[in-house]
Image (tube, rainbow, N blue to C red):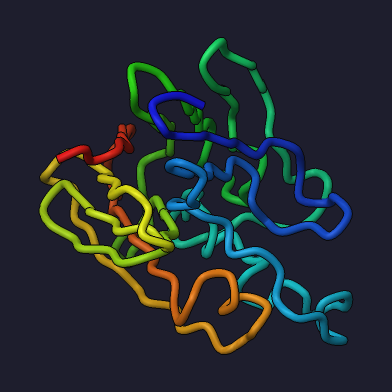
Amino acid sequence: SAAGLTLAVEGGHNGEHHNHNDVGEVVVACNGVPVLVDAGRPSYTAATFGRRRYQQWPMQSGWHNVPLVRAVEQAAGARFRATAVEPLPDGLALDLVDAYPVPELSSWRRVARLADGQVTVHDSWRLAPWNGDAPEPTTTIHYLLAGTATLAAGRADVGPLSGGNRVALEWPADIPVSSTERPLDDPMLSTVWGEQLTRIELDVTGRSDLLVAVRQVTV
Protein backbone atom coordinates (compact mmCIF):
# COMPACT_ATOMS: atom_id res chain seq x y z
CA SER A 1 0.00 0.00 0.00
CA ALA A 2 1.13 3.56 -0.74
CA ALA A 3 -0.36 7.01 -1.38
CA GLY A 4 -3.80 5.75 -0.43
CA LEU A 5 -3.67 2.91 -2.96
CA THR A 6 -3.59 -0.82 -2.27
CA LEU A 7 -2.67 -3.43 -4.89
CA ALA A 8 -3.38 -7.17 -4.88
CA VAL A 9 -2.44 -9.62 -7.66
CA GLU A 10 -3.68 -13.20 -8.13
CA GLY A 11 -1.36 -15.95 -9.31
CA GLY A 12 -2.10 -19.63 -8.76
CA HIS A 13 -4.15 -21.80 -11.12
CA ASN A 14 -7.72 -22.39 -12.19
CA GLY A 15 -8.22 -25.62 -10.30
CA GLU A 16 -8.20 -24.16 -6.80
CA HIS A 17 -10.90 -24.71 -4.18
CA HIS A 18 -13.91 -22.44 -4.94
CA ASN A 19 -12.06 -21.34 -8.05
CA HIS A 20 -12.85 -18.46 -10.36
CA ASN A 21 -10.98 -18.30 -13.68
CA ASP A 22 -8.87 -15.31 -12.72
CA VAL A 23 -5.15 -16.02 -13.07
CA GLY A 24 -3.39 -12.65 -13.18
CA GLU A 25 -6.29 -10.74 -11.61
CA VAL A 26 -5.35 -7.23 -10.39
CA VAL A 27 -7.42 -5.57 -7.65
CA VAL A 28 -6.93 -1.96 -6.52
CA ALA A 29 -8.46 -0.07 -3.58
CA CYS A 30 -8.13 3.61 -2.73
CA ASN A 31 -8.10 4.47 0.96
CA GLY A 32 -9.66 1.11 1.66
CA VAL A 33 -12.48 1.46 -0.90
CA PRO A 34 -12.30 -1.07 -3.78
CA VAL A 35 -12.11 0.51 -7.25
CA LEU A 36 -10.77 -2.20 -9.61
CA VAL A 37 -12.66 -5.12 -8.19
CA ASP A 38 -13.34 -8.81 -8.18
CA ALA A 39 -17.13 -9.21 -8.19
CA GLY A 40 -16.91 -12.08 -5.72
CA ARG A 41 -19.19 -15.05 -5.40
CA PRO A 42 -22.89 -15.05 -6.26
CA SER A 43 -25.53 -16.78 -4.16
CA TYR A 44 -24.94 -20.50 -4.05
CA THR A 45 -27.11 -22.66 -6.30
CA ALA A 46 -26.85 -26.19 -7.62
CA ALA A 47 -24.96 -24.80 -10.62
CA THR A 48 -22.29 -23.28 -8.38
CA PHE A 49 -20.73 -26.69 -7.73
CA GLY A 50 -21.67 -28.55 -10.90
CA ARG A 51 -20.70 -28.70 -14.52
CA ARG A 52 -22.45 -25.37 -15.13
CA ARG A 53 -20.22 -23.50 -12.67
CA TYR A 54 -18.41 -21.52 -15.35
CA GLN A 55 -21.62 -20.54 -17.07
CA GLN A 56 -22.06 -18.10 -14.19
CA TRP A 57 -20.54 -14.75 -15.13
CA PRO A 58 -18.75 -14.01 -11.80
CA MET A 59 -16.69 -17.18 -12.31
CA GLN A 60 -15.64 -16.36 -15.89
CA SER A 61 -12.34 -14.67 -16.70
CA GLY A 62 -14.21 -12.32 -19.03
CA TRP A 63 -15.55 -10.58 -15.92
CA HIS A 64 -12.19 -10.33 -14.17
CA ASN A 65 -9.32 -7.89 -14.61
CA VAL A 66 -7.44 -10.05 -17.10
CA PRO A 67 -7.05 -10.32 -20.89
CA LEU A 68 -9.38 -11.91 -23.43
CA VAL A 69 -7.03 -13.41 -26.04
CA ARG A 70 -8.50 -13.52 -29.55
CA ALA A 71 -11.95 -13.71 -27.92
CA VAL A 72 -10.89 -16.72 -25.79
CA GLU A 73 -11.28 -16.70 -22.01
CA GLN A 74 -9.18 -18.60 -19.49
CA ALA A 75 -10.06 -22.25 -19.01
CA ALA A 76 -10.78 -24.14 -15.79
CA GLY A 77 -8.44 -26.71 -14.31
CA ALA A 78 -5.10 -26.85 -12.54
CA ARG A 79 -3.09 -26.93 -15.77
CA PHE A 80 -4.33 -23.42 -16.60
CA ARG A 81 -1.93 -21.54 -14.35
CA ALA A 82 0.48 -18.70 -13.82
CA THR A 83 4.13 -19.38 -14.62
CA ALA A 84 7.41 -17.52 -14.14
CA VAL A 85 5.98 -15.86 -11.03
CA GLU A 86 8.43 -13.29 -9.68
CA PRO A 87 7.78 -11.29 -6.50
CA LEU A 88 9.05 -7.73 -6.86
CA PRO A 89 9.84 -5.19 -4.13
CA ASP A 90 6.81 -3.17 -5.29
CA GLY A 91 4.57 -5.78 -6.93
CA LEU A 92 4.45 -9.03 -8.87
CA ALA A 93 5.44 -10.29 -12.32
CA LEU A 94 4.00 -13.42 -13.88
CA ASP A 95 3.22 -15.05 -17.22
CA LEU A 96 -0.40 -15.88 -18.08
CA VAL A 97 0.31 -17.88 -21.24
CA ASP A 98 -0.69 -21.23 -19.73
CA ALA A 99 -4.03 -19.90 -18.47
CA TYR A 100 -5.39 -19.65 -22.02
CA PRO A 101 -6.16 -22.49 -24.48
CA VAL A 102 -4.75 -20.41 -27.34
CA PRO A 103 -1.99 -22.33 -29.16
CA GLU A 104 -0.75 -19.26 -31.05
CA LEU A 105 -0.06 -17.43 -27.77
CA SER A 106 3.56 -17.96 -26.69
CA SER A 107 3.79 -15.42 -23.83
CA TRP A 108 1.64 -12.99 -21.86
CA ARG A 109 3.80 -11.25 -19.29
CA ARG A 110 2.01 -9.11 -16.71
CA VAL A 111 3.93 -6.83 -14.33
CA ALA A 112 1.85 -5.04 -11.70
CA ARG A 113 3.53 -2.50 -9.44
CA LEU A 114 2.62 0.04 -6.79
CA ALA A 115 5.29 2.75 -6.83
CA ASP A 116 5.61 6.53 -6.98
CA GLY A 117 2.03 7.01 -5.85
CA GLN A 118 0.38 4.97 -8.58
CA VAL A 119 -0.38 1.43 -9.69
CA THR A 120 0.91 0.37 -13.10
CA VAL A 121 -0.07 -2.77 -14.96
CA HIS A 122 2.19 -3.52 -17.93
CA ASP A 123 1.08 -6.33 -20.22
CA SER A 124 3.36 -7.54 -23.01
CA TRP A 125 2.64 -10.57 -25.15
CA ARG A 126 3.58 -12.62 -28.18
CA LEU A 127 0.86 -13.89 -30.50
CA ALA A 128 1.56 -15.60 -33.81
CA PRO A 129 0.29 -13.61 -36.81
CA TRP A 130 -3.37 -14.19 -37.61
CA ASN A 131 -3.77 -16.44 -40.66
CA GLY A 132 -7.51 -17.07 -40.63
CA ASP A 133 -9.84 -16.21 -43.47
CA ALA A 134 -12.14 -14.24 -41.17
CA PRO A 135 -10.99 -11.04 -39.44
CA GLU A 136 -8.79 -11.58 -36.41
CA PRO A 137 -10.86 -12.07 -33.23
CA THR A 138 -10.53 -9.20 -30.81
CA THR A 139 -7.95 -9.24 -28.03
CA THR A 140 -8.99 -7.03 -25.14
CA ILE A 141 -7.83 -6.25 -21.62
CA HIS A 142 -10.67 -5.88 -19.13
CA TYR A 143 -11.01 -3.88 -15.92
CA LEU A 144 -14.07 -4.21 -13.69
CA LEU A 145 -14.93 -0.99 -11.86
CA ALA A 146 -17.13 -0.31 -8.83
CA GLY A 147 -18.80 3.08 -8.46
CA THR A 148 -19.44 5.58 -11.23
CA ALA A 149 -17.23 5.48 -14.32
CA THR A 150 -16.79 8.14 -16.99
CA LEU A 151 -14.84 7.25 -20.14
CA ALA A 152 -12.78 9.52 -22.38
CA ALA A 153 -9.93 8.94 -24.83
CA GLY A 154 -7.13 7.30 -22.87
CA ARG A 155 -8.85 7.69 -19.53
CA ALA A 156 -11.54 6.49 -17.14
CA ASP A 157 -12.55 8.55 -14.11
CA VAL A 158 -14.05 6.55 -11.28
CA GLY A 159 -16.06 7.84 -8.36
CA PRO A 160 -15.70 4.99 -5.86
CA LEU A 161 -18.42 3.69 -3.61
CA SER A 162 -18.99 5.18 -0.17
CA GLY A 163 -17.74 8.61 -1.25
CA GLY A 164 -14.15 7.49 -1.58
CA ASN A 165 -11.45 9.50 -3.34
CA ARG A 166 -11.76 9.69 -7.12
CA VAL A 167 -9.40 7.53 -9.12
CA ALA A 168 -8.23 7.79 -12.74
CA LEU A 169 -7.17 4.96 -15.03
CA GLU A 170 -4.98 6.09 -17.92
CA TRP A 171 -3.70 4.37 -21.08
CA PRO A 172 -2.52 5.49 -24.54
CA ALA A 173 -5.23 7.63 -26.13
CA ASP A 174 -5.22 5.68 -29.41
CA ILE A 175 -6.42 2.47 -27.73
CA PRO A 176 -10.10 1.90 -28.57
CA VAL A 177 -12.20 1.53 -25.42
CA SER A 178 -15.72 0.37 -24.77
CA SER A 179 -17.69 -0.40 -21.62
CA THR A 180 -20.38 -2.81 -20.48
CA GLU A 181 -22.64 -2.24 -17.49
CA ARG A 182 -23.48 -5.35 -15.48
CA PRO A 183 -26.75 -4.97 -13.51
CA LEU A 184 -26.63 -6.80 -10.20
CA ASP A 185 -29.82 -8.60 -9.21
CA ASP A 186 -28.18 -11.04 -6.79
CA PRO A 187 -28.23 -9.62 -3.24
CA MET A 188 -24.92 -11.33 -2.49
CA LEU A 189 -23.38 -8.91 -5.01
CA SER A 190 -25.68 -5.88 -4.93
CA THR A 191 -25.35 -5.42 -1.16
CA VAL A 192 -21.60 -5.01 -1.73
CA TRP A 193 -21.43 -3.14 -5.05
CA GLY A 194 -24.81 -1.48 -5.47
CA GLU A 195 -26.95 -1.70 -8.59
CA GLN A 196 -24.20 -2.41 -11.13
CA LEU A 197 -20.56 -2.90 -11.99
CA THR A 198 -18.89 -1.43 -15.10
CA ARG A 199 -16.41 -3.34 -17.24
CA ILE A 200 -14.10 -1.38 -19.52
CA GLU A 201 -12.62 -3.19 -22.50
CA LEU A 202 -9.36 -1.96 -24.01
CA ASP A 203 -8.95 -3.22 -27.59
CA VAL A 204 -5.32 -4.25 -28.10
CA THR A 205 -5.83 -6.37 -31.22
CA GLY A 206 -2.68 -6.30 -33.35
CA ARG A 207 -0.57 -4.80 -30.56
CA SER A 208 2.04 -6.42 -28.34
CA ASP A 209 1.95 -4.39 -25.12
CA LEU A 210 -0.15 -2.04 -23.00
CA LEU A 211 0.57 0.05 -19.92
CA VAL A 212 -2.32 1.13 -17.70
CA ALA A 213 -1.77 3.47 -14.76
CA VAL A 214 -4.13 3.93 -11.79
CA ARG A 215 -3.76 6.96 -9.56
CA GLN A 216 -5.71 8.85 -6.96
CA VAL A 217 -7.18 12.15 -8.18
CA THR A 218 -6.31 14.77 -5.58
CA VAL A 219 -7.78 17.88 -7.21
Q: Which residue corresponds to the image point at 54% horizontal and 21% vertical from the top-left?
A: 91
**In the displayed structure image, the side of residue 74 where residue 33 appears, left or right:** left
Q: Quadrant of residue 75?
A: bottom right
**In the displayed structure image, the side of residue 91 where residue 59 appears, left or right:** right
Q: Position of residue 78 (x, y in %)?
A: 83, 46
Judging depth in this view, the residue of 135 and 214 nearest the camera is: 214
The image quadrant where one finds the C terminus is top left
Judging depth in this view, the residue of 32 and 152 nearest the camera is: 32
Q: Position of residue 144 (x, y in %)?
A: 44, 59
Does residue 65 lie above or below 90 as drawn?
below
Q: Which residue corresponds to the image point at 58% horizontal and 64% vertical from the top-left?
A: 39
Q: Which residue corresponds to the image point at 84% horizontal and 60% vertical from the top-left?
A: 18
Q: Position of residue 22 (x, y in %)?
A: 64, 51
Judging depth in this view, the residue of 15 and 184 nearest the camera is: 184
Q: Which residue corresponds to the image point at 84% horizontal and 77% vertical from the top-left?
A: 51
Q: Residue furthest front?
A: 163
Does residue 137 lie above or below 80 as drawn?
below
Q: State whether residue 187 appears in this view.
A: yes
Q: State whether residue 122 appears in this view.
A: no
Judging depth in this view, the residue of 48 and 97 nearest the camera is: 48
